[in-house]
Amino acid sequence: MFNLTQGYINGEWRDSISGDTFEVRNPFNDELIETIADCGIEDAELAIDEASKAFKVWRKTTPKVRSGYLRKIGDLLLEHKDALAALMTKEQGKPLQEAAGEVAFSAGFFHFFSEECKRPDGEMIPAAAAGKQFMTLREPLGVAAMVLPWNFPIGMPARKVAAALAAGCTCVVKPAEDTPLISLAFAKIIEMAEVPSGVVNVLPCSRNKVQQVGTLFCESPKVAVVSFTGSTEVGKHLYSLCGKSVKRVALELGGNAPFIVFKSADVDLAVQGLMAAKYRNSGQTCVTANRIMVHKDIYEEFLEKFKASTSTLKIGNGAESGTTQGPIINEKQLNRVVRIVAESLEQGAKLEMGGKTEGCCYLPTILTKVTPDMACWKEEIFGPVAAIGSFDSEEEAVEEANNSDRGLAGYFFSRDYSQIWRVAKALEMGMVG
């Protein structure tokens, strides 16, 4: 059912107009999974045109009708959870249990917005002059072009597409070059839900064509909003392109999340929290804990317990039972992790455990004696490497946590209620947990 190799445009499965194709390989063993359509600028123009036409009809559908489609998509995702999870693990590498969880929360986005779309609340505003009243209404923007990351290859399209459809927008989706198959399976779910043709379009493309397709998304007058999840550098470039036409943008970019453990924290709970925040998806998430700061009075206890927990992780093929850490997505990213660790050790960091590759995987790694000028502290690692430092005071920890221009997320553990409120307000991050 999900052995799909073509793009999905206007409700039809199509080869690329050029006839070009590219290979999709398993990141664990480099085995060829599929050879699929390599869509370029002509395909993207067609998809945008069809989405623009479909918008004229879709925007007029009632919230109740849109709610029905969204509910059905969510139900279908759950119905085919096992098959989708297996495909995701083969293509992206994450453990099967994590992949199944991603499919489940993807369904949750559609179920949430199936109810939320019934409440497109406006506002009544009193006027200064007698006998007058101001009224605001929420209207759909138009075509939403979406550029996806590879680390959550069905979670991200689900979150973006569900919200857009609920609002009455239509979508053109470009999957990440490493993980297009699960996005095509997502398009199949859209087709099975009988969503009208042209409302959702999916364009797989290789690295050779991604720049021209992304540029078209930003410059096309028929695209109303561009949504991008990925690196800060690429996000800045797309933002500048969209500025030429004053196009709306929705960006979720890189992070360098702090993880602070205060003296009053429950150490066991903090270790448990860090295991999830650091090693989920082998550390390949934009909200992963990167800069770990532990109060000096509990530092040794925390480190020993964290090392013990880390030692229980099992790397390998995500499809095999018991695997908790899958491969790094590709050779370029693996080499990047290797470089960051090597540079940090040269700068004086201490290797507590790990620090080696095993095939396409990187062993869960703990670095201590780190300082703010080290590569493992300054850069977004995007791998299973935990860089741990210590601190003396709350003020010192908060100042260092905020010493980053990538404040996507942050975490801290404390049982001091006053401190919890102070630090939560003081951290300059979009999300605090």
Image (cartoon, grey):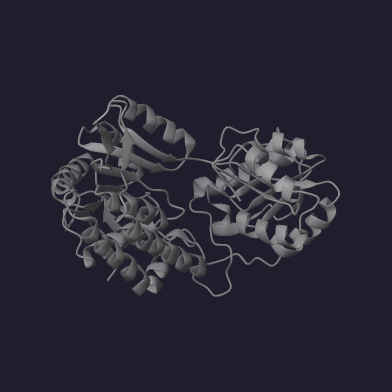
20 relative position to 232: left or right: left
- Relative to the observer, which residue lies in front, 184 or 250? 250
Residue closer to the observer: 363 or 80: 80
Q: Residue furthest front?
A: 130
Where residue 111 sits: x, y (%)?
36, 63
At horizontal 30% and vertical 27% (from top left) the residue drawn is 246
Q: Residue at x 57, y 58 (%)?
A: 280
The percent position of residue 294, horizontal first and vertical second, equals: 77, 48
Residue for point 43% across, 35% down: 234
Q: Nearer the viewer, residue 350 or 245?
A: 245
Left or right relative to 2: residue 430: right
Q: Quadrant of the N terminus?
A: bottom left
Q: Relative to residue 346, is residue 65 drawn left or right? A: left
Q: Nearer the viewer, residue 127 or 170?
A: 127
Residue 204 visible at all: no
Quarter where residue 304 is shown: bottom right
Report x, y in % for residue 374: 70, 36
Q: Is residue 96 above or below residue 130?
A: below
For this orientation, the residue located farthest to the right is 297
Residue visible at 33% across and 57% down? 183
Relative to 260, 175 lies left or right: left
